[in-house]
Image (cartoon, grey):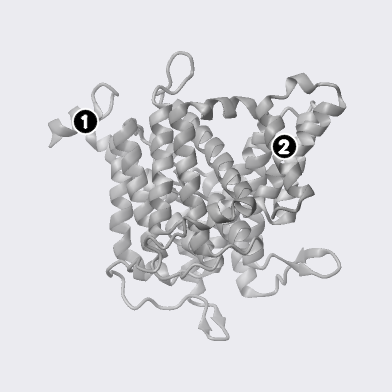
Amino acid sequence: MIKILETLFKLQEHGTDIRKEIVAGLTTFAAMSYVLVVNPSILAAGGMPIEGLITVTALAACIGTIMMGLMTNYPIAMAPGMGLNAFFAFTICLTREVPWEAALGIVFWNGILFLLLSLTGIRTKIAESVPEALKIGVQCGIGLFIAFIGLKNAGLVVSNPATFVSIGDLSQPVTLLALFGVLLTVVLIIKNVTGAILISVVVLTVIGAFIPTETGYLTTHPESILGAPDSISNTFFAMDIMYPIINIAQTWDLIFALVFVNMFDTIGTLIGVTRKANLVDKKGKLPKMGAALTADAGASVIGASLGTSPVTSYIESAAGVSAGGKTGLTAIVVGICFILALFLTPLMKVIPLMATTPALIMVGIFMMESFRHLDTSDMTSLATATVALIAMPLTFSISEGIALGFITYVGIMMGTNRMKEVSGITYFITAIFLLRYIFDLK
């Protein structure tokens, strides 16, 4: 077995061993395992049946992560993406009122398109043509959007007819507990505690068992600790792949937004994690970028078939790299952990929604971090990024933020006689967005 692992993952060549890779895999899993409870709650908010979503999330994460490990030999884990799942639930299903089965069809075509772009090399041209300010604005906007959803679920912000939103009732124990969870999570992360988000979820769940509600207690008692995983019959191959084609005029922008976000999120994660693991070449490029993006796209197609939002690479993989992970064996360990975690489904079912809100807010904070890379001395960059990031939470739509970001950038460049600096692809995308608004193709 040891010889097989050595041959498959080239452990000695990468200066690692089986023990280090196992520890790294466990570390990565601890850092990202919160997705098992957060992803189902987000998808359920979009109308999907909650039964079986924990199983779907774990299977999608396991398959995607193992694909990444075997196809690239990189210590990168995958799971349904935070931000992408929020876009799926709150923009596609709730705001645009697309049935969840059809939304899964949109995810399927997103994966197919992403795969074609990766295999043909068009992906590189698109990545190079989009201005950096827009990429930063979109990532930060998604972070702000996710954090806003977390604050809303926690009751820390509520609707107000006069001001649209206002502060929630902080005299309520549940709201105070959510605020405590946010502070706890931030403190644990600052102290570099592995699995900080998961620890926060567990602590809040335990405290919730002592907080009374109208129907009992915030956290209910589990029927058992261990149990068989739930069936995924409700969502398995439930996707409607014809809906996006028949209604292409109303769905093209949703597919584009998924591809756009997935592409730049994945590329950013891959480069960030592999640099930390010293896997990039002398020119700073990732040798197996094509294979990594192919694995990412393939995992999204499989995820849609199982019944979840797009699967993507997780930045939490950096925790495993810090623990010594350097090869795909780390990813294999993470995949196995996701399957084993399924037998704790009865415990995960009792976690209240409130306990997951700090995770959403913290993920949002993480995504806002990229704003420091923005050239704030350049008004064009600052305006483009600001419009994109503010529009997402205020319109409750990631796709609208992307559209307004493109229009703002091109409008400013044309108004300042810098048209030649804008790529043809950016002009084309902006024109399509403008036509959508003009003819109200929503």
Disc number lying in front (2 or 1): 2
Q: Secondary structure at mark 2?
A: helix
Residue 347 is drawn in which quadrant? bottom left
Q: Classify residue 346 as left or right of residue 89.
A: left
Q: Classify residue 239 as left or right of residue 384.
A: left
Residue at numbered disc 2: 430
Residue at numbered disc 1: 8
Q: Look at 49% across and 67% down and name the residue there.
A: 48
In the rendered structure, find residue 242 and report the number of the disc placed on it.
none
Residue 339 is drawn in which quadrant? bottom left
Q: Look at 32% across and 65% down and name the residue there.
A: 344
Residue 184 is drawn in which quadrant? bottom right
What's the residue type where badge 2 is placed? Answer: Thr
**Considering only vertical position in the picture, is 121 above or below 235?**
above
Q: Secondary structure at mark 1?
A: helix
Q: Pinpoint residue 351: horizontal percent, then vertical percent.
A: 46, 69
Is any part of residue 34 visible from this angle? no
Q: Classify residue 282 as left or right of residue 400.
A: left
Of labels 2 and 1, earlier in sequence is 1
| Front-lying residue, 395 or 41 | 395
Task: Locate the N terminus and report the quarter of the image it occupies.
Answer: top left
- Give the crowd class for mark 2: few <14, some 14-19, many >=20 residues within 10 Å: many
Task: Measure the alpha-carbon separation of dots 2 and 1.
Answer: 46 Å
Q: Pinpoint residue 205: horizontal percent, then vertical percent.
A: 48, 68
Task: Locate the C terminus and report the quarter of the image it occupies.
Answer: bottom right
Q: Residue furthest bottom?
A: 215
Q: Look at 42% across and 28% down and name the residue there.
A: 290
Q: Look at 37% across and 48% down and name the residue there.
A: 29
Q: Pinpoint residue 82: horizontal percent, then vertical percent.
A: 53, 50
Numbered disc total: 2
What's the residue type where badge 1 is placed? Answer: Leu
